[in-house]
Image: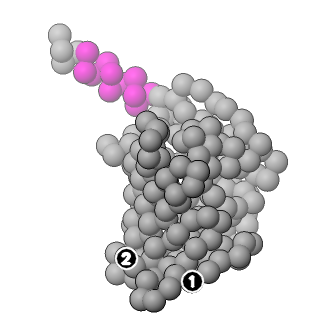
Amino acid sequence: MHRRLLLAVIAVALTACASIRDKALPLPEQADALQFSGKLSVKVTGREQGGSGSFELQGTPRAGQLELSSPLGQLIARTRWDGQSVLLQTPNEQRHYADLDSLTADLLGEAIPVAALFDWLRGRPWPDAPSQALEGEAKGFRQLGWTVDLAGFADKALIVARRSEPSEVVFRAKLETPATGQ
């Protein structure tokens, strides 16, 4: 009996994941498109929001796609944006947002600067906002109210970004593949 229930749950999960994958559309060709994959975690202190899993990020801040998978490899969400709107697809629903900051604020309670992540994941500040190098021996920079720690970037492909106001948010990304594209 338990085995049948487990098989039914797995079948439903696979069907749900397949339904997200089936809705994928090819991204428009972009000369400056990038692609990243790896593991990430987001923690918002004082709230029950955040999570961890695998990610695949491709495109540019203007148009792209972010897929999030559970630690077991199941696709749990896909976000697509094109400069006009943002679409979040999960196995159970689709939601539209005005921009990526609105989406992350809704899901996490705090906005994550996804546009800046394309550069942060390359180990450099986003060129569209002022930044300041960290002092002393520290590797990294401050930008948009975040401290981006690159101490583990060269040897571990690890980026840790922290923001303390208005809530403490810690974003960690461990890249499995280096950025492809420009």
Camera-side residue of 41 and 32:
41
Amino acid bearing label 1? Ala
Colour scheme in the image? one colour
Amino acid bearing label 2? Gly
Classed neighbour count for the residue bearing mark 1: other residues with Cα under 10 Å, few (<14), some (14–19), many (≥20) = some
Classed neighbour count for the residue bearing mark 2: other residues with Cα under 10 Å, few (<14), some (14–19), many (≥20) = some
The stretch of residues the image draws in magenta is: 5-15
- Predominant secondary structure in magenta? helix
Residue under pointer 2: 152
Q: Picture coordinates of residue 171 (x, y %)?
A: 47, 58
Q: Residue furthest right?
A: 84
Q: Quadrant of residue 120?
A: bottom right
Q: Is residue 139 above or below residue 163?
A: below
Residue located 59% across and 46% down the image: 110
Q: Picture coordinates of residue 138 (x, y %)?
A: 43, 83
User: In front: mark 2 or mark 1?
Assistant: 1
Q: Is residue 172 above or below residue 151?
A: above
Residue located 58% across and 51% down the image: 166
Q: Earlier in the sequence, mark 2 or mark 1?
A: 1
Measured Cα–Cα span from mark 2 to mark 1: 16 Å
SS for dot 2 = loop
Residue under pointer 1: 133
Camera-side residue of 136 and 34:
136
Inspect the magenta stretch and tell me whether residue 45 lies in it: no
Q: Picture coordinates of residue 8 (x, y %)?
A: 31, 18
Q: Picture coordinates of residue 67 (x, y %)?
A: 53, 48
Residue located 27% across and 22% down the image: 7
Q: Quadrant of residue 3?
A: top left
